[in-house]
Amino acid sequence: MELSSAPLHKGQLPWRGLLLAASLLIYWSSPTKAQVSVEAVPPHVAEGANVLLLVHNLTETVHVFYWYKGENRDSSNEIARFITSTSEITTGPAYSGRESIYPNGSLLFQNVTQNDTGAYTLHMIMENFDLKTLSVQFHVHQPVTKPSIEVSNTTVKEMDTVSLTCSSNDTGISIHWLFNGSSMALLGLTDRMKLSLDNSTLSINPVRREDAGEYQCEVSNAVSSERSDPIQLDIIDLGPSDNSPNKVDEVAYTVLSINGQTPKPPTSALPSPRSTETVYSEVKKQ
């Protein structure tokens, strides 16, 4: 693989007489040249992928490109050098066999590992033998693994408390929660929902019937993301609470008549007193 470069052309300044030219030169002066720079593409890369340290705005000839691992230009840190006059490539002690240097000074890393994370230094001997030094960094990340959800109980009574915890062995991750497939960050948490500082635990207190549904967590880093399997949370509906104004206690009364003796016909206009005891038994239906 080779990187090609197109020939560079300098723009011509339009002249409209000496006065116009002088005024343009005074107003504009000399256009500022873009500064040579180097960029990691991409700056965050998954382990096993490739990354290119790409040189930009190289407008003059370079005699030699040197690449070093780290910010110290010690000979023991040299990866490779490219001599432009002879197209000669020389590798150094820090060369791993996975790097390729190109005629424009760019450096390609293949099959990167986490040990490749860090700073790199490009040192150049320019056409007029000036020295220029640039540095760049990139970071290598392991793809995240699939998380799982641990829940205190998947079937809870309304007004109880439930906690869901997103479990992952990965580090340096962000955690997000989903409800019925939609981000809870977009849906908005209710005042009954609380997240732990690292977002790993979602607590709902108290639970209500509208909280029933599927919950998932998603873990991500700069290069990948994974979602857990959904957990179905079921809510037992207790109906109106005991304090509800629509809740009416139902009371039944049972009347028992107990006669201590056999009743006798009345001897006067007024009925004779009867030895009758009335008992009320109050039963509250649940």
Image (tube, rainbow, N blue to C red):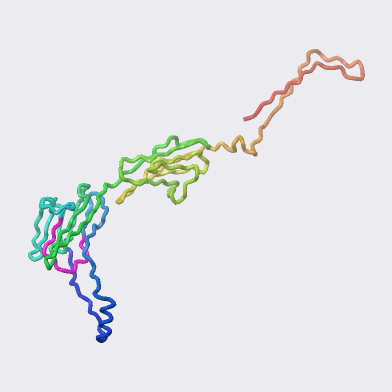
Q: State left or right for residue 154 relative to residue 278.
A: left
Q: Is residue 11 above or below residue 5?
A: below
Which residues make up the magenta segment?
54-67
**Residue sitting at x 80%, y 12%:** 261
Q: State left or right for residue 88 relative to residue 54.
A: left
**Residue sitting at x 21%, y 52%:** 119
Q: Is residue 115 magenta?
A: no
Q: Is residue 148 above or below residue 104?
A: above
Q: How many marks?
A: 0
> x, y (%) of residue 92?
10, 53
Query: Could you say which quadrant of the image residue 163 lies in?
Result: top left
Q: Residue furthest top?
A: 261
Residues 79 and 168: in front is 79
> x, y (%) of residue 114?
22, 47
Query: Could you say which quadrant of the image residue 129 lies in?
Result: bottom left
> x, y (%) of residue 78?
12, 53
Q: Is residue 61 magenta?
A: yes
Give the quarter of the figure containing the C terminus.
top right
